[in-house]
Amino acid sequence: PPARRALVQARAAPTPPGAPSPPAKASRRAVFGAALSATISSLLASPVKGALAAEEGVVEASLPLTSPARLGDLAAAAPGAEVYFGNGCFWGRQHEFVQTERTELGRTDDEVSSLVGYAGGFSAKGKDGKVCYYYGSPDTVYERLGHGEVVRTVLSDASPEKATEDLRAFARTYFANFKKIRGFGMQRLDPQDAGAGYRNMIGVPGGMNSPLMKIIEEENVNGMRLLEGEGNRPNQKPSEDDVFNAVWIYDSDRLPFYPAEVYHQFHDGLGYRFPEEYTVELKKNAMRRGLVKDTGCPEMRERRFAEFESIAS
């Protein structure tokens, strides 16, 4: 498989014209693995996919619209809530959510809230613990700790109605990032990145019992299975794996979001580029206002990274 060194060298070269579609079988894990093998040889190998033996906690696809009786609960829970979404590589997904914030919700660059990071692992690190990418020390690597890649968004605190509108827009964006495979159901857009670290998940305060789940259920137009998750345990075979046509639902209060490294924020997609207005200028804006911060994890220092370091310092 191609090495990550090749990817980094490609990023250091001038941007080629056009934006080609992502390669069908270019696994990002394979891309990163070879160049870093000397430093992460002790890390856990890719988790083995497991078949879902039982479907406790499955939510039926045909669900009623939000009833007036639930509006009080939504009014209390929605404003200012943090919600995270995961389905494959977080690079491209962040761009989707940022575009939703800008174009559908009318947020300015100073109001963009979407960050990439890690969630869904049941660990004792606490909300401020260190969770890193594969080039971190073994006891901090996100997948070893049970986490997967996600994008975290923040709902408006202006009013319950605005917060509900935000969540509905984010949920629509999320479920639009799947494609139907005849006879099997919905598959995410980058199935080549496989394993529990790329599993489909949504985290909301309260999990399956959250009043926010009514909006998620209503926007689940694909009829995907919504499975109640408890989080994967550190350094164990995942109990909640990369399941086809299903989304794990987590309580984000119990399984919080951990921001990813500066390098991963507002990144190009895998095999395709976004405009520098997004990958450079918006990233600098996010750093200046403290949205993107140093996590204490090792950084991949590619071309132009010094520009971001000067802001962080």
Image: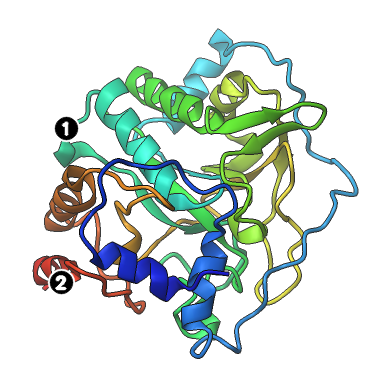
Label 2 vs label 1: CA separation? 24 Å
In the image, 292: left or right of 259?
left
Q: Which residue is mark 2?
A: 309
Seen in the picture, residue 141 relative to 106 is either above or below; the reply is: below
Q: Residue furthest right?
A: 53
Q: Nearer the viewer, residue 282 or 118?
A: 282
- Closer to the observer: label 2 or label 1? 2
Q: Secondary structure at mark 1?
A: loop
Which quarter shows the N terminus? bottom right
Image coords of residue 83 (percent x, y): 45, 41
Q: Look at the picture and state if 179 lies above or below 274.
A: above
Q: Is residue 251 visible?
A: yes
Colour logic: rainbow
The amino acid on which the numbered mark 1 sits, given as a three-letter code, is Thr
Pick whichever, 112 or 125, lies toward us. Answer: 112
Q: Residue at 31% x, 37% y: name it.
A: 98
x then y, percent, for residue 124: 56, 73
Q: Give the left or right position of residue 35, taking residue 262 as reference.
A: right
Q: Position of residue 240 (x, y in %)?
A: 73, 55
Q: Residues within 10 Å of mark 2 (few under 14, many from 20)?
A: some
Quadrant holding the C terminus: bottom left
Q: Residue at x 20, y 59 (%)?
A: 14
| SS of the residue under disc 2 | helix
Q: Quadrant of residue 186?
A: top right
Which of the two residues, 10 or 224, is positioned nearer the viewer here?
A: 10
Residue that appears at 62% across and 66% down: 146
Residue placed under numbered mark 1 in the picture: 108
Q: Is residue 163 left or right of residue 131?
A: left
